[in-house]
Amino acid sequence: MFSKEEVLETFEMIHLNGLNIRAVTLGINLLDCTDKNFDKLNANIFSKITTVAERLLAESQDIEHKYGIPIVNKRVSVTPIAFLLESVVADISQKEGVSRAIQVAKTLDQAAEKVGVDYVGGYSAMIQKGWTSGDIALINSLPEALRSTERVCSCVNIAETKSGINVDAALKMGEVIKKTAEKTSKNNGFGCTKLGVYANAPADSPFMPGAYQGVGESEATINVGISGPGIIRMIVEKSENLDFRALAEKIKRASFKITRVGELIGQEVAKRLNVEFGAVDLSLAPTPAKGESIAEIIKAMGLDYCGIPGSTAALALLTDAVKKGGSMATSFVGGMSGAFIPVSEDASMVEAAQVGALSIEKLEAMTSVCSVGLDMVTIPGDTSSETIAAIILDEMAIALVNNKPLGVRVIPVPGKKAGDKIKFGGLLGSSVIMPVSKFNSSKFVKRGGQFPSTIRSLTG
């Protein structure tokens, strides 16, 4: 039996503080779609996705109504497409290989549209120690593929704790990000919002653009991303007289309850679709909506703005408490699992950047204690590809030293300078262009080669 207090608390979580499931993502293995005949490969991909994900939207909506808990995003992730391209680009010109990769991206987009999902992830490559013809075709296709599709997202993994960092790939991705922004300049470089560069990219993330179906995963898997910043903010605001130990305990208990909801929803979706239940990503994910903010939680702990001294410590406490509470509520913890700090998707983060409390350098420091990395950061359009590559390398180094997944999703907005405001809309929100160092990093990043794995890799 549930007590009256528990029933009231659940009601408040859902109806007053915005408890929802941020994402239910169906991962689909596409390795059996491989074929040397390109037309057949494309047809196989479309058929597999539309068959396996056919009931994802309808069943998710029915579960929303049954439990009264919104599922904000329904998504699909697939095997990294670079793997499938190997058989159809090896013996043709690079230009033709890029053309074929773009056609596959459009096929993914069409399949996602047919099954009614918000995004499809997995237009991706794993190049932490080198690249193949399939990787090269996919990476060179990214600017046009992301321009010409609506739902396709890309994750390019260029670093692993055990492997080090592919520095040549960091430099290449700096160039790709610049070209993608230019290709989508009419929409403030929108294509870059669907592109992330990662270290230690998890194979079971439900969040875009980092979601893909890893080769060690099942034939089809449901992964769930929870939400709940509004709930945690309310708890912190009501606990202003508590010391840090007591506050952490409050956050931990709330995180347990939020994660149990994610576990419940994920298990039921998986059962209805007759697929495996994978994992719950414990990351608190903000939105531009009032109250749905990680920065607001940090402010509620006693800081004027997110980004000022004390912010890294506050975020460390939050992330640790969420992980401790959440890990007791689900048998399988996956994805990034921590606290997301995407700038444009968090209205209070944007405010902090506008008043000068939050800088890219401070964001970078904060990523050492949370998850996802530098996310949805808008920078001046004239930022060089070498500077972008250096920003990527900094974040990859933090991931290696801390043995954790991190990413970089930056948008060099064409024609915009530091202090300008831009708007993406929807869950991507709006932002202010953050200043970037004008000093030169190009000689450093152009050293290229493989950045060695750290001493942390010498385990086992």
Image (cartoon, rainbow, N blue to C red):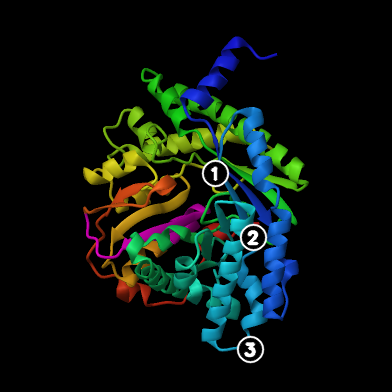
Residue 329 in percent (x, y) is at 64, 32
Image-quadrant location for residue 3:
top right
Q: Is residue 132 visible in the rendered structure shown here?
A: no
What residue is shown with label 2? 78
Magenta run includes residue 397: yes
What is the three-letter code of the residue carrying label 2?
Val
Magenta run includes residue 413: yes
What residue is shown with label 3? 91
What is the three-letter code of the residue carrying label 3?
Asp
What is the three-letter code of the residue carrying label 1?
Ser
Other residues around mark 3 within 10 Å, as few (<14) / some (14–19) / many (≥20): few
**Is 220 rendered above or below residue 148?**
above
Image-quadrant location for residue 188:
bottom left
**Of 151 and 454, which appears nearest the observer?**
151
Q: Which residue is painted at 56% across and 68% down in the image?
A: 106
- Specify which label sits upstream in the sequence, 1 or 2: 2
Magenta part of the chain: 394-418
- For residue 337, the mark is 1
Q: Which residue is painted at 27% across and 41% down in the image?
A: 351
What distance separates the C-alpha of mark 3 from that of mark 2?
Answer: 25 Å
51 lies left or right of 439: right
Q: Is residue 296 visible in the rendered structure shown here?
A: yes
Other residues around mark 1 within 10 Å, as few (<14) / some (14–19) / many (≥20): many
- Residue, far right: 274
Residue 206 in percent (x, y) is at 58, 49
What distance separates the C-alpha of mark 1 from that of mark 2?
Answer: 20 Å
- Specify which label sits upstream in the sequence, 1 or 3: 3
What distance separates the C-alpha of mark 1 from that of mark 3?
Answer: 41 Å
